[in-house]
Amino acid sequence: MIVFKKIIVIIIISCIQLGYTQENSVTKCKQNIVTYLDDMEKVLTPKSDQVYHLRYTTKTEFFEKYNIPKTTTKTDMLLSENKIVMDDEHMKLYGDDKNMFVVLPKVSKIYWNNSDPRLFSDSNSYKKFLDIERSLLKSSENISCSSLQKGKDRIVIIPGKEFVKATGLIKQTLVYDHLQKRVTSVENRFNAKSKVKKQLVNYDVLNYNSSKKIKEPLTYIFKGTDLMSTYEGFEIIDNRQK
C-alpha cells in the first residue's frame, strides 16, 4: 500500500558523538545508532494527545538502462493516534480508523476506501523498518563517522554481503544534526539488480509534538453532502466493503 511506503522513509537513525580514538570510533558510532533506534521505537505511533508533523523531500535516481527520469517529491504529513493527512505533488490522503480517501488531482479522481487497521498498528511497517536497520548494523562490514560543519555528523554504513544480496542496498549515508537532535538526510545506494540507483530523503520538519490539528477525513472532501469546491467535478470511486 502506497502510504506504508511513505511512512517507511519518514525517520531513520542515529545519534553520533565524535572525538574518540580511531580504534573506538566505529564501536561507539555503532552503539549510538543502536541506542537511537531503541529510542525511536518508543515513538512508533502517536499517543492520544499527540500529532506528528513530518515534511520531507525524496529524490530518486534510476539506473540508465530503465530510461526513467529522476524524480523529486515533496511530502507533508500529519499523523495522530487514529488519523492521517498526507500531501505531495501526486496525491493527497485523508484517513482515520473508518475511512480513507486517496485523491489524485491530475486525473480528477477520489478513491473512497475502508480504512486499513494496519495503518495505525504498533506492528506497522515503521517497526519492521527499524528491525531492518538493526540487521543492517549487525551485518555491516564498515561504519565510518566524520564531522561536518554547523554541528552535523556524517555516518556511512556499508552492509555485509548477505544483506546486499537480500536487499540490494550497497551503501547508506546519514547526516545527523546535534543541534536539532535528529537525522536531517538519508541517502541509500543500490546495486544494479535494483531499478533504483540512488534515493535521497531530506527531512525538513520532524516534530513529534505538533500543535497542528487533524480533522475528520470526510470534512476534507465534503461540505455537507456536496464535494468541496476544490474537488468540484472529481469522480468518486467508492471501493468500500459495505
Image (tube, grey):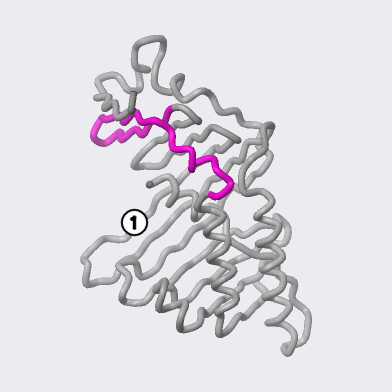
Residue 54 lies, with reference to residue 197, above or below; the image says above
Residue 146 falls inside the magenta stretch = no
Residue 227, picture quadrant: top left
Q: Going 64% across and 44% down the picture, which residue do you hit?
A: 207
Residue found farthest to the bottom: 23
x, y (%) of residue 12? 57, 60
x, y (%) of residue 50? 67, 35
Between residues 199 and 146, which one lies in front from this camera angle?
Answer: 199
Under mark 1, the amino acid is Thr
x, y (%) of residue 170? 44, 77
Disc 1 is placed on an element classified as: strand
Q: Going 48% across and 76% down the picture, which residue do you hit?
A: 171
Residue 131, picture quadrant: bottom right
Side of 153 relative to 224 (left or right): right
Residue found farthest to the front: 242
Residue 121 falls inside the magenta stretch = yes
x, y (%) of residue 202? 52, 57
Range covered by the magenta-colored residues: 99-123
Side of 172 relative to 43 (left or right): left
Residue 128 lies, with reference to residue 159, above or below; the image says above
Other-residue count near label 1 (Cα within 10 Å), few / some / many at <14 / 14–19 / ≥20: few
Q: Going 31% across and 76% down the picture, which residue do you hit?
A: 192
Q: Going 69% across and 76% down the picture, which residue do you hit?
A: 29
Residue found farthest to the right: 20
Q: Which residue is mark 1?
A: 71
Residue 174 lies, with reference to residue 238, above or below; the image says below
Q: Quadrant of the C terminus?
A: top left
Side of 110 relative to 124 (left or right): left
Residue 140, picture quadrant: bottom right
